[in-house]
């Protein structure tokens, strides 16, 4: 194991480590804690310049206020309506595409695979004008579907890379013996491969949920106004409206961050498995 | 991995056309929806943008052919060079995320009680949106009451409003962007360290290797896959930086924190006008820069792929 396990080091090192660990964490999360603390400060405290001292009261009302006086709830709902169908669509398409690229040998296989990989890395700006134009032309500007369709298409690149590599790692004999038995290709996909893909599906779902929930650029390009806009774009406009009302902006930020944070803590194993796929094999 | 089932299985005569041809057709059936969507929303727009960069277009009316005029204008545009230079700053300083993530992973690769919670909390910044990260850091840097401003004021007597100073602003934005990126690299390296062969480490220890030597000659070579992915995601992240710029400074002060992605958006879609063609030309330049890196990455991946 590298580095040397701390329990095998000198006493002083062990002590130092025990102190350094929480200290480093506090420093690392300092900006975040500042915002969390600000989100429960009253506006009078902030007006009086009491930014870091003991708050005179814990102003949980900041949270009430963003829900009652701003479209926060609507924004959160919009995010949900965009994110969940995207997860479903991208995972479905990539299960199929990944299966095709992993199991069959045909001429353009690698070419298609690297098209998905490369597409996944391009800057959004090269897509922006035509995608916006296409969305406007099809009447999908400022609708959930407009955002969802684009997200599904773009995420399919990354997801296919992921699924294809995962299926490559499955024992191929399973498929071969099924073929010998005369099982059709579609049934092989459905009854043999898909059940084995459960961990990959879980990992990707959690990842895509987080990516799409946190996505900001396309939210501003393809939607406007609180009717459809997801929470990231919503926060930006709230920030514009509430200049110098940091307690409200902070509370809004915390609320917007909550779903992916919950997702991460509940599904941590899958999340990290998804993120680090490929980081270990050489 | 030889697909030999076909040869082994003599087909009963009279089977339907589908049954005899399904092995050839199935991949295309499975690929069709994904490839169609990808072509429509990714490949076609790239081509369309390149084509559009030779036109003058306001997004609604007729397009006017300009030839290379958009590019000529671009190469004489000071804002373009400011944005390009800021992209270079982003790229160079964003790379700090890779070693920083490595050292954080080494620091946390222990088995003391509660370490799992520590690891998750250190990873935390990556899970939250860049919009929230941007707002958090705007507050952190805010003049007169921001935590960092206060700390500097306390230490030196005068605070620095990082986001209002053209000479500091891009570095301040990169620092904000680094926060989640370091967490990302850390998690990649933590997974990598988990898979470092204990035998090799022990053998190297017996040979007297330790500290930096051990890290450089024994550990890092084994972490190569993690390093590759960390570099890929960091390079792409640096060149894609948009959210943080848009949230924290909106390109300011005086356009000094613009990057190409943001400048393109400004030209094509904001109150400054709907210059779609000019925007597309900026996007093409950014795309060309990124293609250099993407080609390198893909080249390495193809090599690994055929090596396996």
Image (cartoon, coloured by chain):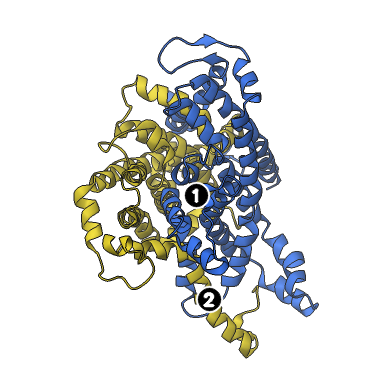
Question: Can residue A180 be seen from the camera position used here?
Answer: no
Q: Residue placed farthest to the bottom in the image?
A: A11
In the image, residue B29 above or below residue B133: above
Q: Residues within 10 Å of mark 1 (few under 14, many from 20)?
A: few
Check if mark 1 and mark 2 are on a common chain. Answer: yes
Drawn side of residue B98 relative to residue B128, left or right: right
Return the x and y of residue A25 as percentages of the image width and height.
49, 70
In the image, residue A207 above or below residue B263: below
Q: Residues within 10 Å of mark 2 (few under 14, many from 20)?
A: some
Q: Residue at x 51, y 75 (%)?
A: A23
Q: Nearer the viewer, residue B70 or B233?
A: B70
- Per the rendering, the mark at residue A174 is 1
Q: Residue placed farthest to the left in the image?
A: A68
Drawn side of residue A202 relative to residue A278, left or right: left
Question: Which chain gets the yellow colouring?
Answer: A
Q: Nearer the viewer, residue A24 or A188?
A: A24
Question: Can residue A224 be seen from the camera position used here?
Answer: yes
Q: Nearer the viewer, mark 1 or mark 2?
A: 2
Question: Which chain gets the blue colouring?
Answer: B
- Per the rendering, the mark at residue A21 is 2
Q: Residue placed farthest to the right in the image?
A: B207
Return the x and y of residue B97 as percentages of the image width and height.
60, 56
CA–CA distance in space, label 1 to label 2: 47 Å
Q: Residue at x 50, y 23 (%)?
A: B44
Q: Residue at x 35, y 54 (%)?
A: A253
SS state under label 2: helix
Mark 2 or mark 1, which is nearer the start of the sequence?
2
* Protein chain holding label 2: A
Return the x and y of residue B169 as percentages of the image width and height.
56, 48
Location of the N terminus of chain B (image quadrant) = top right
């Amino acid at each position: 194991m590298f580095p040397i396990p701390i329990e095998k080091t000198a006493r002083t090192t062990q002590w130092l480590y025990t102190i350094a660990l929480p200290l480093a964490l506090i420093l690392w999360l300092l900006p975040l804690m500042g915002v969390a603390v600000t989100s429960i400060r009253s506006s009078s405290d902030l007006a009086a310049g009491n930014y870091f001292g003991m708050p005179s009261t814990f102003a949980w009302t900041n949270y009430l206020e963003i829900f009652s006086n701003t479209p926060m709830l609507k924004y959160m709902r919009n995010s949900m309506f965009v994110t969940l169908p995207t997860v479903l669509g991208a995972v479905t398409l990539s299960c199929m595409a990944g299966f095709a690229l992993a199991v069959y040998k045909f001429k353009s296989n690698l070419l298609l695979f690297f098209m998905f990989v490369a597409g996944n890395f391009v800057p959004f700006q090269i897509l922006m004008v035509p995608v916006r134009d296409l969305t406007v032309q099809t009447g999908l500007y400022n609708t959930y579907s407009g955002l969802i369709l684009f997200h599904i298409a773009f995420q399919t690149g990354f997801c296919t890379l992921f699924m294809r590599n995962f299926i490559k790692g499955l024992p191929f004999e399973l498929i071969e013996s099924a073929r010998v038995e005369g099982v059709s290709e579609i049934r092989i996909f459905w009854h043999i491969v898909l059940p084995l893909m459960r961990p990959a599906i879980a990992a990707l779902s959690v990842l895509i949920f987080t990516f799409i929930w946190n996505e900001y650029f396309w939210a501003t390009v393809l939607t406007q106004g609180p009717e459809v806009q997801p929470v990231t774009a919503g926060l930006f406009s709230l920030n514009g409206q509430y200049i110098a009302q940091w307690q409200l902006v902070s509370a809004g930020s915390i609320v917007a961050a909550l779903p992916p944070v919950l997702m991460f803590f509940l599904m941590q194993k899958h999340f990290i498995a998804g993120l680090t796929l490929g980081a270990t094999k050489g | 991995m030889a697909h030999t089932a076909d040869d082994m299985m003599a087909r009963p005569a009279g089977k339907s056309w589908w049954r005899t041809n399904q092995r050839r057709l199935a991949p295309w059936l499975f690929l069709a929806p994904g490839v169609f969507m990808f072509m429509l929303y990714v490949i076609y727009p790239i081509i369309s943008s390149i084509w559009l960069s030779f036109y003058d277009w306001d997004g609604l009316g007729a397009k006017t052919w300009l030839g290379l005029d958009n590019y000529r204008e671009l190469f004489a545009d000071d804002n373009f060079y400011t944005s390009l230079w800021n992209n270079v700053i982003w790229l160079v300083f964003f790379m700090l995320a890779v070693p920083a993530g490595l050292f954080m992973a080494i620091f946390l690769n222990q088995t003391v009680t509660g370490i799992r919670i520590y690891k998750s909390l250190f990873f935390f910044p990556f899970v939250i949106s860049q919009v929230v990260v941007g707002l958090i850091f705007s507050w952190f840097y805010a003049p007169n009451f921001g935590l960092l401003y206060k700390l500097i004021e306390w230490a030196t007597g005068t605070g620095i409003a990082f986001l209002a100073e053209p000479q500091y602003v891009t570095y301040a934005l990169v620092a904000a962007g680094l926060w989640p990126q370091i967490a990302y690299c850390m998690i990649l390296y933590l997974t990598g360290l988990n898979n470092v062969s204990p035998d090799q480490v022990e053998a190297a220890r017996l040979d007297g290797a330790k500290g930096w030597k051990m890290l450089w000659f024994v550990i890092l070579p084994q972490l190569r896959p993690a390093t590759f992915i960390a570099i890929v995601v960091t390079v792409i992240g640096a060149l894609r930086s948009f959210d943080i710029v848009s949230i924290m400074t909106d390109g300011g002060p005086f356009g000094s924190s613009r990057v190409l992605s943001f400048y393109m958006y400004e030209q094509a879609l904001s109150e400054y006008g709907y210059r779609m063609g000019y925007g597309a030309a900026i996007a093409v330049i950014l795309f060309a820069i990124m293609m250099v890196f993407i080609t390198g990455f893909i080249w390495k991946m193809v090599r690994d792929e055929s090596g396996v």
